[in-house]
Amino acid sequence: MNALARLLFIAVALLPGSMTSSNKGEPSSDELTRIVGGSEVPQNEYVPYQISLQYQTKRGITHFCGGSIIAPNRILTAAHCCQGLNVTRMTVVAGVRNLDDRTGYRSKALNCTTHPDYTALDTSDIAVLSIDPPLKYNNHTIAPISVKGKEFVPGNVSVTVTGWGRRFAISLPFLEQFIYPNSLRRMNYATITNEKCRARLMTKVTERDICAQGLFRGVCTGDSGGPLVMKTSKGVHQVGVVAYGLAICGLSITPDVYTRVSAFSDWIQKQL
């Protein structure tokens, strides 16, 4: 298995009960987790809490996971984005819509604290990165996302996920630039209950997870660790962290699985 696959989106094989993790070594251009479906965030519009987690490889610096800003020097992401990797080779880029944009703010990762209960493709896929220098908020391109609170999000709630995503589940080498756009993409769909999620092949889902599903859309291989958010009366609130899904992204018959942020509210606050 490619050494870099563990940094990325954890995949679940099509056969029930058969799960595979892609998280060893360095990120490969073919296996980065990306969004299937959705649309490009318009020019001059930003998702200020979204960051690109990047890794220094022999080929240069590459995006491999997403994350969200929860404090000037703290980033919320997935545990599998850190597992087995050299944190000193990670950087965080904030304040950009396009990965080619050189006007963003780059900080170095100092350490990655994963939840003590984390087990790949099973539970507690959540981590907090410490970064330096701290990010400077401007409330337009760089701003934190609300994560505090223990309210349980049920099924049939409208949610949004963002990421620098692969647009199709199948690779077509002659259309690489189209399949792997550098512009941030956004996708809307709805949560489903955990009972329905388990009935639709995601049998290991627990109350620490939250599932979402849409027609021919979903997270795929770079979106790992990225934020799932919902609108509330107080503004946008993060409810999930991209964890895992089917090996073939965007199939309407299977849900995407996220780590449920509310289940880890106390733990997250202790990391700030």
Image (spheres, helix red, strand yellow):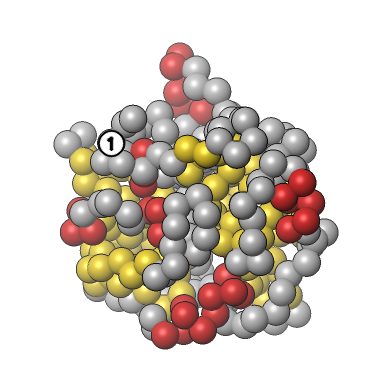
Crowd class of label 1 (few under 14; some 14 to 19; many from 20; radius 10 Å): some
Left or right, residue 270 beside residue 15: left
Q: Residue 107 at x, y = what percent?
A: 27, 65
At 25% from the left and 68% from the top, the residue drawn is 111
Q: Quadrant of the C terminus?
A: bottom left
Of helix, strand and loop, which one carries label 1? loop
At 48% from the left and 60% from the top, the residue drawn is 125
Left or right, residue 197 beside residue 6: right
Any part of residue 237 in sight: yes
Q: Residue furthest top?
A: 174
Q: Residue 94 at x, y = what percent?
A: 39, 61
- Front residue (pair 198, 98): 198
Query: How many marks on residues?
Result: 1
Q: Residue 224 at x, y = what percent?
A: 48, 50
Q: Quadrant of residue 160?
A: bottom right
In the depicted structure, whether residue 272 falls above or below residue 76: below
Which residue corresponds to mark 1? 3
At 45% from the left and 23% from the top, the residue drawn is 176
Q: Residue furthest right?
A: 156
In the depicted structure, whether residue 224 falls above or below residue 128: above
In the depicted structure, whether residue 26 falls above or below residue 65: above
- Front residue (pair 95, 85): 85
